[in-house]
Amino acid sequence: MPKILFFIGLLFFASACSNVLSKSSEDRAILVTSSMVSVQTTKLSDVGTSSEDGAAVSPAPLFAKSTSAGLIAQNSLFLDELTKDTWTYLSSDWATTNYLPWSWRSDTLTGGDFANTAEIGLYALSWLAAYDMGELWSPTWGETEAEVTAVLNQLRAWQTGSQTDQPHGPNAYNNSVFYQWYWISWTPPVVGDNTGLNQLVPSIDNAWLALSLITIREYAEANNHVTLAQKADAILSDMDFTLWYNDTTHLFYWGDIQNPAGGVVADIYSNENRIINFTARALGQLSAEEFQMSLAALKQDPGTYNSITVEKVSWDGSYFTYTSPALFIREMASSYGTNTIIPATLAQIAYAAEKGYEAWGFSDSYDVEERGYVQQGAPPTAGGIAETVPGLVTPHAAALALITPSASVAITNLQTISSTYPSAYNDMYGFMDSVMTKPGDADYGKSSYRFTALAQEWIFLSLANYRSGFIWDYLYRDDGVFQAHAEMYGSVVYLPVILK
């Protein structure tokens, strides 16, 4: 039966690929020529996308939903419940301490009371998304403002050094950017001690944080929450992404212990690290010329699986590397979305079907039960091993696919996971981190014992973008973001935004 669902979903996918999501009544148009970049505001009814020869074509929605009334209602009920349950987890006292998210939580395992820089930013942004949804379960503005303010105050206290509790040294690197892990159960929370990866200075996680902060600032400005906007802006103003940049190779580093300019280089376009380049340009920390050189320095090799060609493959085919940046960057409105994200999604689906798995969604996650974190992907790859645990699927991958034309397929897949494997979905908090979908495997049907902050945040924010384009609309109010997009994709693109 699950294999049949794959093929039903592919029928929906085939009819959806040419559609484009449009929400707001006014759009900005990005026009890029060989000699200039100009940004103008136009009515949606006056514009369309442009073909390669410059001819205008009509705009279309980013993805389409099934026209079957019964299926639409069924999908809507499922997504409404998933959204509510995921928010119940994210906002629960059980999964948070001192206004910060536990990296993971479990009924049976101890630990997890630490938070990563990216998790903190996405958590704060999730509060605004939940409020914006306007559901009966949504937080009030008073609750939302209090939570987001507390997160921003904590980040600023770490960044400036105004928090005098520094048992493991400064809580931010160079009064600028943030470390890998913070011990959130300490009062007040502090950076972890200098063992393991606690004090690694991660470029990618700081980029996630910065994009979250830009979105928070733009939301606050658009809705006249001046103090909140100022707090987000103050943190952003002191974040320096050139700390990771090598102006000789034009590549960013991942970062190392107490050393941003260390560790391996972030050199593959379709690894999630491309948002470092994007963020640095959006903040005005790379010139237009340097930005182009930094993009050109990234490896952009094609790969093929089962006659499906992905134009720019990631190292190991982990799905989040393709789609998590697209939660912020409007990549589905670009050639990258058409030629890389869409075929990478199809390859995931085809790979699962060929292997006989009952669901798809190959992305880094925790293994089943108490087992640790594993790399997980699907072919094609740039050289890495695709699956390290054959058949292990994570629901966050299918949720990320909600922002692609395969939204209907993703919904079907999420429903399959929740209905086929009783342990994979918690009636209160939503999806566990992973489940084994390979029939005959000794672990078949077993799920991870963990909920994870990052997966829950990706699920929730994917749902927010699916519902309304929430992140895109506010992020693209920022002139730097708009300019970075224009320069990154070099074509005419029309992006719905909440205008200033």
Image (tube, rainbow, N blue to C red):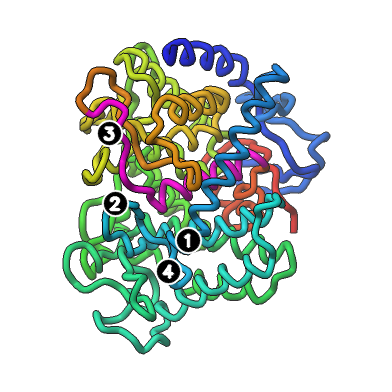
**Three-letter code for the amino acid on which mark 2 is drawn:** Thr
- Which quadrant of the figure contains the N terminus? top left
Chief secondary structure of the magenta span?
helix
The residue positioned 39% from the left and 63% from the top of the image is 241
Residue 16 lies left or right of residue 315; in this view the side is: right
Foreground: 239 or 421?
421
Labels 2, 1: front one? 2
Q: Distance between the Cα atoms at labels 4 and 2?
A: 19 Å
Residue named by callout 3:
316
Foreground: 187 or 378?
187
Q: Residues within 10 Å of mark 3 (few under 14, many from 20)?
A: many
Q: Is the residue 415 above or below the residue 34 in the image? A: above
- Tell me which label, 4 or 3, sits earlier in the chain: 4
Q: Please, what secondary structure does the residue beneath circle 4 have?
A: strand
Foreground: 137 or 345?
137
Magenta stretch: give its range. 443-467
> Are circles 2 and 1 on residues that touch, CB within 8 Å?
no
Q: Distance between the Cα atoms at labels 2 and 3?
A: 31 Å
**The image quarter in which residue 76 lies:** top right
Q: Distance between the Cα atoms at labels 4 and 1?
A: 15 Å
Q: Distance between the Cα atoms at labels 4 and 3?
A: 34 Å
**Three-letter code for the amino acid on which mark 4 is drawn:** Thr
Labels 4, 3: front one? 4
The residue positioned 38% from the left and 44% from the top of the image is 272
Residue 108, label in figure: 2
Q: Distance between the Cα atoms at labels 3 and 1?
A: 26 Å
Q: Is the residue 341 above or below the residue 427 in the image? A: above
Residue named by callout 4:
97
421 in magenta: no
**Three-letter code for the amino acid on which mark 3 is drawn:** Asp
> Are circles 2 and 3 on residues that touch, CB within 8 Å?
no
